[in-house]
Image (cartoon, helix red, strand yellow):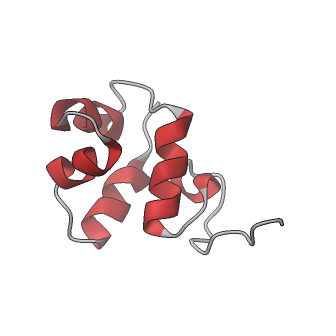
Amino acid sequence: MYYPRLKDLREDHDLKQKEVAVILGIDQRVYSNYETGKREIPTRFVIQLAEFYHTSTDYILGRTTLITPYPYKK
C-alpha cells in the first residue's frame, strides 16, 4: 500500500531517505520500498515515525488530515 505522507513528512523535515532509514534501523533501500508502496510498512515503524515527526499514525496512514497528534491517555 502506498502512503504518500511518508515522503511528504520526510521532505518537510529536510531529510534524506538514508537518514530516516538510520532512525528506523533499516537499509535505505527498504525504506524506499515503503515510500513507493512496493512493501508494506510494519506497524512498529509507523508508530516510530509518528513519534519522530510529532504526528499521529492516522495522519501517516491518510486517515485524517490533522497533522497534530492526539493527546496521550495516561
Quarter where residue 32 is shown:
top left
Residue in the image at 58% along x and 59% along y: 59
Left or right, 70 with reference to 1:
right
Residue 49 is situated, as x and y percent measured from the top left of the image, at 45, 54
* Position above or below: 63 against 53: above
Determine the image quadrant of residue 11.
Answer: bottom left
* Along the viewing direction, whichever of 63 and 30 lies nearer the viewer: 30
Q: Observer-nearest residue: 53 or 61?
A: 53
The residue positioned 65% from the left and 52% from the top of the image is 63
Relative to residue 41, is residue 49 depicted above or below? below
Q: Residue furthest front?
A: 74
Please tell me whether residue 16 is drawn above or below residue 72 in the rendered image. Answer: above
Q: Residue at x 75, y 72 (%)?
A: 71
Q: Position of residue 43 (x, y in %)?
A: 56, 36
Q: In this view, which residue lies farthest toward the top?
A: 39
Residue 8 placement (x, y as % from top left)? 34, 61
Determine which quarter of the picture holds residue 12. Answer: bottom left
Q: Is residue 45 left or right of residue 33?
A: right
